[in-house]
Amino acid sequence: MEPYFINICLDEKQTPINRIRKEFDLTIKDETYEKIYKRYKLLNKTKMITVSHDSAVSSSTIAGTIERYITRTSDDDQNQLFTTDLKIIYIDSRPDLENNDDKSECVVSNLVFLNKETYTKHSLLLRDDNIIYLGLDDNKITPLEEARLSELGIEYYTLKKIRQKSLDDILENIVEFNKNSPVYIVFDMSVCSKKIAPYAKNNTDDGFVLDDIICIGKKLSNLNIVGIDITNYDFDNPTTDIKFRLTNEVIQIIIKLLFNLKEKTINIYNEHSRFIIWKDIDDEDNIGWRILKNVPLTLREKIIEQIPPDTIITFDMSKLKNVDDEFEGSAEVYLSTTTFAEQELLCWGRAEDTDEDFTKCILYPEEKLSMVFELLNV
């Protein structure tokens, strides 16, 4: 192996060029230190969010992050042991403690040196008490993983245990005991129910639903989170696919809640939440309505307060900025409110056959199909 020659040149008069050798592979000047230090300070303060379909990526992100939080656990100069005070909250249906060729099944066993060699080539010890599991599925844990969980004594909460106790209480306990430590969160989408993340890989039958995700996000946001991995989804699908868009929204909700991002208000709907629909007064179609979009949440809520259920009012759309892109016509429109549950009871085809009038407030079929996503994106 050829040596790599580095010239550290803090004083040009003291250069070894043409004295020791004619050329060096790299010369580090005084300003180089300035640039490196500024970059290091920036990186050290930056919270990292990694999103990948491959859950094995967490081996690298965690191995890199633990070196930012090195601690010495011995005062004996002859036997110094360096480890980390970083805590990892591992939200997954599997503990990833296997010993095989599938790196995605060996993320944690790789980090704690359980296997013959580490594929990330890191050398800093990650202790067993650095890790907390949340959401493990008893039906997916292999015999080897079960034995290793018992042997290592890692703190873990299965879905069964969470259902028996209280997710809220468990999270309160986790926050209380880790509030003074830097925390890295791994969120493997397999822990989600198929109902809310249909394009997550290997969904769990009794996985976390939206209320659980919101609870996890709000509680853990009180910790000193230094990074998040969101992994194990299938995004090889068209963006028009409703299941694809729903999985996207869940990922965005996780990130916004954990990092308390305020640039957009997260609006969580259920089937009885009311939203605004509109119809052009001059519309020749006697039936169809559309969802009112591109109106700020606070203004939308004020408008809804002015429209009692089962009521239609007229409204001057020119008063609104960034009015709905699909609005083309007179400034005066009909406004009303509806819910998911109400629209599920209405049938466009039957309305056409029976020549229903516009007072039934039936959404156009394409509006009804996409209403959950339009509402999440307003």
Image (spheres, grey):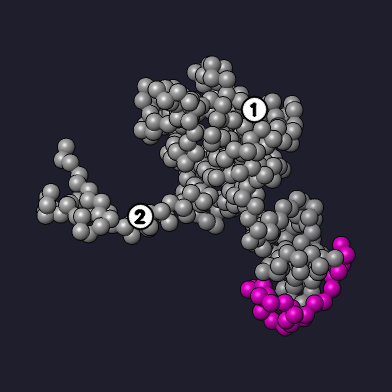
Query: Is the residue under label 1 in contact with that under label 2 (CB below 8 Å)?
Result: no
Residue 45 image offset from top left, x and y in percent: 51, 51
Q: Is residue 99 above or below residue 47?
A: above
User: Circle 1 is placed at which residue position?
Assistant: 157
**Category of crowding for the residue at label 2, using alpha-carbon neighbours closer than 10 angstroms: few (below 14), some (14–19), many (at least 20):** few
Q: Is residue 149 above or below residue 357?
A: above
Instruction: Tell me, yes or no, if residue 245 can be seen here.
Output: yes
**Category of crowding for the residue at label 1, using alpha-carbon neighbours closer than 10 angstroms: few (below 14), some (14–19), many (at least 20):** some
Q: Which of the pair 105/203 is nearer the observer?
A: 105
- Asked if residue 30 lies left or right of residue 176, the reply is left
Residue 361 image offset from top left, x and y in percent: 79, 65
Quadrant of the rendering where the C terminus is positioned:
bottom right
Q: Quadrant of residue 176?
A: top right
Distance between the alpha carbons at the discs numbered 2 and 1: 46 Å
User: The magenta stretch spans which residues?
Assistant: 306-332
Q: Magenta stretch mostly in which secondary structure?
A: loop
What residue is at 69 percent from the left and 25 percent from the top?
Answer: 161
Q: Which of the pair 194/162 is nearer the observer?
A: 162
> Residue 13 — which label?
none
Please say whether residue 219 is one of the residues in the magenta stretch.
no
User: Circle 2 is placed at which residue position?
Assistant: 33
Q: Nearer the viewer, mark 2 or mark 1?
A: 2
Residue 258 image offset from top left, x and y in percent: 63, 47
- N-terminal of the pair, mark 2 or mark 1, is 2
What residue is at 28 percent from the left and 55 percent from the top?
Answer: 10
* Tag 2: amino acid: Tyr
Return the residue found at the far front: 13
- Asked if residue 253 lies left or right of residue 117, the reply is right
- Asked if residue 76 lies left or right of residue 360, the reply is left
